[in-house]
Each structure stands twice: as structure tokens, then as C-alpha cells.
Amino acid sequence: MGEMTPVATADDVTIHCPSEGRYAFYNSPYPAHRLSTGIDLYPQAEFGGSAPSPVEGEVLLIRKVRAPRGRLFKDHGLDVVTLLRSRENPGRVVKVLHVEPTVEVGEELEPGSELGTLIRSGYYGFGTPPHLHLEVRMPSDPLRARGGCHLRRILDVVNLKPLDELRGEVTESGPYRSYVRIHGASRYGLVADVGGVPGVLDGGIPNYGWVGAHFGSERPEGRLIRLCGRPVAEIEALHERTCTAVCTDFTISLDGNPVGLFMYLYPEAEPRVILVPRTPGALRLRESDEIELRIE
């Protein structure tokens, strides 16, 4: 199913992302992400496409679970939780959501082995792209929304330069979301000034009301995160090489229309950001359009 890159670890369990995909620690409103215990992996596939196993392990449990109805979109009708026993650390299990498994209990998987198909969960917003949600858990407490093991980023982020403006080219567009290549973005993602040091932003602003950031060996000394010179968040929790921050009062707009800006980390693929309108179809963008986002 393609090359996989180790991107995160928790308690000696290594998490792999499709090399041509993207990943995010903080691009979600759910508690595990704000607590740095959840990670989302985005293969280069649409809903119904193949989802690769992100870890090495044995399938322990497959359980269908109720999910809300999709708001402004047709959902899959349910969600599925899959538990895998880590082969690296048999004392930990890995919880995966948003995948309809094509495997059976007892099967052994390698990173990149087919796990199942990507489903459109009712837990999503209408603009949420296909992805796997993953947590590393204790076997005695595998299913709760809280209680996962702390995740640590593996890949380094270096040679970062904060952006001065948000200009870019539309590479793909539809009624629910548009993908944009931002001119001057780093190879890892979108770079801001994070408390005085450059950092890659990870999250959805201003939609979630908070955002994460990834930096290198130099730790932030200030509290403000500035994107293109504008304050967008204030750091609330500082970790080893990441932080979370509460958004300030601002909007992001395109030609006067408010949009959500969603940002990710990239192992190898050229970075993109995703723009989500307030209602489906409100953005009428075409491939190759040149755009400029404003922070106000």
C-alpha cells in the first residue's frame, strides 16, 4: 500500500504514517488531541479507499459503535473501533477509529498492511477529510475517550521561517473543502512565530478555538503565536517539542468570506492547507486559482 514513515511514538509503540500522506496531533476538537494522546493519519485516499495499518501488531477486537448523524453530509451510519496488540510492546494496545476493517481478529499486521476502508463518521464535520484516529492505550482501559498514553513526535522540524503572507494556489476544490499550496510554506507545513521561535502549526483555526504547534530544540520563551505577524493564539501548555494554545479573537477570510484554515504535518509530500467554508458550496474555487487569505 505504499511506503510508511515513523512519525510518533508512545511507550515504545511506533506509529507510522503513509509517506505521501499527512498527520496531525491537534487537528480535532476531541479531548485526546488537546491532551497529546491522539493522532490522526491521512492517507492519500478518498472515503471508501484503503486504510493502512499504522502499527505492527495483532488484531484483538473489532466493534461497531454508534455515532451521531452527519450534519450537512451523509455519514456511514456507524463508526468502528479496532484494537491491535502492539508487537513492539505487548503491554500496550492501539485503538483505531474511522476504519471499516477488512481483517479479522487474530490476524497479524505490519505497518502498511491493509487494515480496512476509510469511512465518513458522523463524528466528523462536513469538511473533515478521510483519516484514521489512533491512540496507544493500557489493555485494562482501551476504549474510553480519555486515558491514552502521551504521544511524542519523531520527525524533526528544522530550517523554519515564519510566513509573511498567506498566498497560494488551489490544487483541488469541492463543495466541502479546498486544498491550497501556500507559497513559501516549509516542507513540513505552515510556519508561524511560536513564542519567539519558528514552529509548524497543527490544527483548525479559528474553528476549534485552540491550535497546536511543533518546534525544534529551541523552546518558546514568549506566550503568543503570531501567523503572518498577527496574534492568533496564546500558549496554554508547553511540552517537549510541542505546545497547545488558545486562539485569540480573529477571523480568516477569502474575498470577504470567512473560512476555516486546517493545517497538518507532512513526512514527504508537498504541504497543503485545507480551507473549509461555513456552509458547503460557499467557496467557489477552481484548480490553479491564485488566492490570498486575510487574518483580521
Image (cartoon, rainbow, N blue to C red):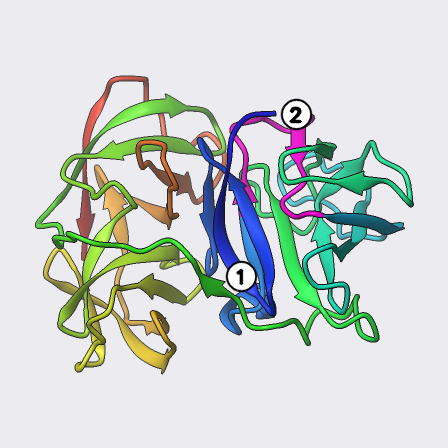
Q: Nearer the viewer, residue 247 or 237?
A: 237
Q: Quadrant of residue 73?
A: top right
Q: Residue sitting at 73 percent across and 54 percent down?
A: 87
Q: Farthest residue toward the front?
A: 88
Q: Secondary structure at mark 2?
A: loop
Q: Position of residue 261 (x, y in %)?
A: 35, 48
Q: Residue sitting at 51 percent across and 69 percent down?
A: 36
Give the amino acid type for the residue marked by disc 2 in the picture.
Gly
Crowd rating for badge 1 (residues with CA inside 10 Å; few <14, some 14–19, many 20+): some
Which image quadrant: the C terminus? bottom left
Instruction: Judge left or right: residue 29 versus residue 183.
Output: right
Magenta region, main secondary structure: loop
Q: Position of residue 201 (x, y in %)?
A: 31, 57
Q: Secondary structure at mark 1?
A: strand
- Report the magenta residues as a range: 41-56
Instruction: Judge left or right: residue 111 versus residue 175.
Output: right
Q: Residue sitting at 75 percent across and 52 percent down?
A: 68
Q: Position of residue 263 (x, y in %)?
A: 36, 48
Which image quadrant: the N terminus? top right
In the displayed structure, would residue 283 be above or below residue 157?
A: above
Give the amino acid type for the residue marked by disc 1 in the picture.
Thr
Instruction: Judge left or right: residue 278 versus residue 4.
Output: left
Which residue was labeled with disc 2? 49
- Check if mark 2's residue and mark 1's residue have beta carbons within 8 Å: no
Q: Quadrant of residue 277?
A: top left
Q: Nearer the viewer, residue 76 or 212?
A: 212
Instruction: Judge left or right: residue 237 versus residue 289.
Output: right
In the displayed structure, would residue 55 be above or below residue 271?
A: below
Nearer to us: label 2 or label 1: 1
Q: Position of residue 267 (x, y in %)?
A: 39, 41
Mark 2 / mark 1, whichever is N-terminal: 1
Mark linked to residue 9: 1
